[in-house]
Image (spheres, helix red, strand yellow):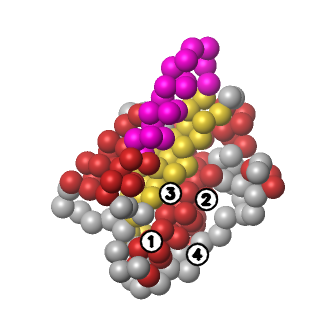
Amino acid sequence: MSTQDAELPSAPRVEGPSPHVLIVRAPYYRTVVEGLTIGAQRILGEAGATSEVLDVAGAYELAQAIRIALRGSRRFDGFVALGCIVKGETDHYDFICRASMDGILGVALQFGICLGTGLLTCDTVAQAEARSGQDGHNKGAEAAAAALLQINIARRLGAA
């Protein structure tokens, strides 16, 4: 399904206390990631959630930062990982995309966290901009909605 065919993201109703979410982002493509962040914060705000933003050096460090947050004394009900990787002329793109996504999924599965992922992997910056704009089709907003749905699942199943 293409971005344009997708249903516009909306804030799910969250049962129980307002969730607190950590947005971990890799702002290498600052304008794109800022757009993703605005989309994520809009959805979280509509759901009554609070959030904090933590910047990391690059997409490769997203999973590491989430794992560090889990080791810390502060509690988050969920996480949103945001970033952008644009294909270059070398195979570095393939390596970073695979390692970053595997790392994010690995942390989520190992620790059973509620996580929404908005890590764009695009051929061009124009593609990334189309997925981070404020026209409604925003992958940051989709990632935040996914995290909130996961929080609902965890609470419903007694895992929160």
- For residue 3, the mark is none
Ranked by sequence position, the earlier of labels 3 and 2 is 3
Instruction: Please state which of residues 92 and 44 is positioned toward the viewer in this rendering.
Output: 92
Q: Which residues are magenta?
A: 87-104
Ranked by sequence position, the earlier of labels 1 and 3 is 3
Which of the 4 image quadrants contains residue 151? bottom left
> Does 99 lie within the magenta span?
yes
Mainly helix, strand or loop, the magenta region?
helix
Q: What's the residue type where badge 1 is placed?
A: Ile
Coordinates of residue 79 in the picture (x, y in percent): 41, 58
Could you tell me how far apart the alpha carbons at marks 4 and 1 are, in whole angstroms? 10 Å
Q: Is residue 70 above or below residue 94?
A: below
Q: Residue at x 60, y 29 (%)?
A: 86
| In front: label 1 or label 2 | 1
- For residue 142, the mark is 2
The answer to whether the residues at label 4 and label 2 have Cβ atoms under 8 Å apart is no
* Identity of the residue furthest to the left in this view: 73
Could you tell me how far apart the alpha carbons at marks 3 and 2 are, in whole angstroms? 8 Å
Ranked by sequence position, the earlier of labels 4 and 3 is 4
The answer to whether the residues at label 3 and label 2 have Cβ atoms under 8 Å apart is yes
Could you tell me how far apart the alpha carbons at marks 1 and 3 are, in whole angstroms? 10 Å
Q: Is residue 135 above or below residue 34?
A: below
Question: Taking the image as drawn, is residue 53 in sight?
Answer: no
User: Number of labelled discs?
Assistant: 4
Could you tell me how far apart the alpha carbons at marks 4 and 3 are, in whole angstroms? 13 Å
Residue identified by numbered label 4: 12
Q: What's the residue type where badge 3 is placed?
A: Gly
Element class at badge 4: loop
Image quadrant occupied by the C terminus: bottom left
Residue identified by numbered label 3: 116
The answer to whether the residues at label 1 and label 3 have Cβ atoms under 8 Å apart is no
